[in-house]
Image (cartoon, rainbow, N blue to C red):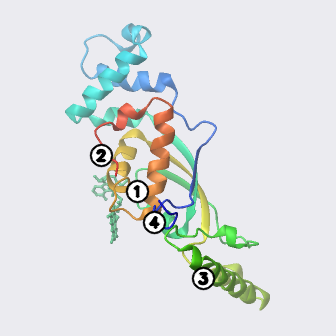
Amino acid sequence: MAPHTEKVANVLVEWTESGIPSLQSIIDAAAAGMVSRKDEPYRTFVADLTLERAKDFLSKMIRLGHESVLEHINFQFWVSMSRVASHQQVRHRMASYTQMSLRKKRSLTPDDFVVPPQIRPEDLDEWIADTKNVIATYEKWLAKGYDVDVARRKLTQEARTDMVITINARSLRNYFNLRAKHDADFEINTVAKKMYNLIEKQGLAFLFDDIGFS
Ligand SMILES: Cc1cc2nc3c(=O)[nH]c(=O)nc-3n(C[C@H](O)[C@H](O)[C@H](O)COP(=O)(O)OP(=O)(O)OC[C@H]3O[C@@H](n4cnc5c(N)ncnc54)[C@H](O)[C@@H]3O)c2cc1C
C-alpha cells in the first residue's frame, strides 16, 4: 500500500522503564479476584498461583464483566504524537498524563510536526513549506518580544508533543474499544495499535482478546 493511503501516522510509542506490568502484578490481579470469591485469605493461596492459572482466571473475570480486578494491572508508555491526537488522548480521564509543555520556548523544526500519512508524495514539499511558515510565524512573534504563551498560539495542531501515560488494564480496554477501531482518527488509532503491539509482544494480549481491532 502507498504511504499516503495506509493511514499509519508517524507517532512513537514505547514502554517506559517501568511500563511493562510485572508478572506478579498479573498474578495479584487474579488473586484479588479470588479474594472476592474464596473463603481463605490471600496469603494462603497466592504462593501457589501460577501465571497460567492467573491468566485463565482473569479471562474468566473479563467474560463475567468483573473488570475492577483489572485496575490492579498498570501500563506506562512514552508517546510522541501531534497536539490534535494528544487532545483526544487526554479525554480518556481514567489515566495519568504528563505532557511536554509548549509554555517553554522551543527551537522548532519541521520534525517537530507530525505529517499526516495521507499527504501525497507530490504534495509533501508544499506541506512542509507551510509548516516552515508556521515556525517562522511563531518565531516572529517571539522576536517581537511577546511571551511564549502568546507566540505558541500561532502553532498548529500537528505540532508534536511527548507524554508519559500511566493507564490500568480496565481503562486501556475502554481506550482500545474506542480508539483501536477504524472510525477513530487515524493518528490516535495508530497510537492504540502500537500500544497493543507492544503488549502482545509481552504475552499480555489475553487481557484484550475480545476487543476487535480494525
Ligand atoms: C470516534 C469518536 C468520536 C468522538 N467525537 C467526539 C466529539 O465530537 N466531541 C467530544 O467532545 N468528544 C468526542 N469523543 C470523545 C468521547 O466522547 C470520550 O470523551 C472519549 O472517548 C473518552 O472516553 P471515556 O469517557 O469512555 O474515557 P474515560 O474518561 O477514561 O472514562 C472511562 C469510563 O469511566 C466512566 N466515566 C468517566 N467519567 C465519568 C463521568 N463523569 N460520569 C460518568 N461516568 C464516567 C465511563 O464509563 C467511561 O466510559 C469521541 C470519541 C470517539 C472514539
Left or right, 98 with reference to 174: right
Q: Which residue is mark 1?
A: 92
Could you tell me if the residues under marks 2 and 4 are in contact, i.e. CB atoms within 8 Å?
A: no
Q: Nearer the viewer, residue 213 or 81?
A: 213
Q: Residue at x 45, y 43 (%)?
A: 196
- Name which residue type carries label 2: Gly
Q: Nearer the viewer, mark 3 or mark 2?
A: 2
Q: Earlier in the sequence, mark 1 or mark 3?
A: 1
Secondary structure at numbered mark 3: helix
Question: N-terminal of the two: label 4 or label 1?
Answer: 4
Would residue 90 be seen by someone viewing this image from the given angle? no
Disc 3 crowd rating (10 Å Cα; few below 14, some 14-19, many 20+) is few
- Observer-nearest residue: 36 or 98? 98
Q: Secondary structure at mark 1?
A: loop
Check disc 4 and give the amino acid type.
Thr
Q: Which residue is mark 2?
A: 212
Residue 5 - label: 4
User: Whole-Å distance between the Cαs marked 1 and 3?
Assistant: 24 Å
